[in-house]
Image (cartoon, rainbow, N blue to C red):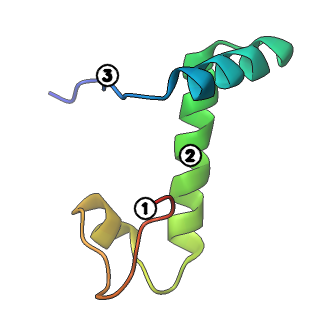
Amino acid sequence: MVRKNVAFKIRLLEELHRVFANACRMEHRPAAQGVRGLIRGFISGVQADPALSLTQAAAGRRPPGRRWSGE
């Protein structure tokens, strides 16, 4: 059986959280919806990157010398 919903906890600087939450409010959307959109956008970028396959990303691997965005 596949779980439909999973959750994960992240730590953010308080300022980053505040700005993100305010941006979501201005767009009239819950923060969770904004985070899901960011995740989908990240996955789309990985799929479009010929140097990194989605299979590698799903397995937590990357090509040697390659950094994830934001590292």
What residue is shown with label 2? Answer: 40
The amino acid marked with disc number 2 is Arg
Residue 36 in the image: above or below residue 52: above
- Residue 16 horizontal/vertical position (percent): 60, 29
- Residue 31 horizontal/vertical position (percent): 61, 17
Please give the label number shown on residue 7: 3
Count how many numbered circles sit on residues in the image. Answer: 3
- Residue 17 horizontal/vertical position (percent): 57, 22
Please give the label number shown on residue 36: none
Whichever of labels 1 and 2 marks the residue nearer the N terminus, that label is: 2
Pointer 2 with pointer 3, Cβ within 8 A: no
* Disc nearest the viewer among 3 and 1: 1
What residue is shown with label 1? Answer: 71
* Disc nearest the viewer among 1 and 2: 1
Q: CA distance from mark 1 to mark 2?
A: 19 Å
Whichever of labels 3 and 1 marks the residue nearer the N terminus, that label is: 3
The amino acid marked with disc number 1 is Glu
Secondary structure, mark 3, is: loop
Pointer 3 with pointer 1, Cβ within 8 A: no
Packing grade of label 2 (10 A; few <14, some 14-19, many >=20) is few
**In the picture, which quadrant includes the C terminus?**
bottom left
Whichever of labels 2 and 3 marks the residue nearer the N terminus, that label is: 3
- Residue 13 horizontal/vertical position (percent): 49, 28
Q: CA distance from mark 3 to mark 1?
A: 22 Å
The amino acid marked with disc number 3 is Ala
Q: CA distance from mark 2 to mark 3?
A: 15 Å
**In the picture, which quadrant includes the N terminus?**
top left
Q: Residue at x 51, y 85 (%)?
A: 50
Secondary structure, mark 1, is: loop
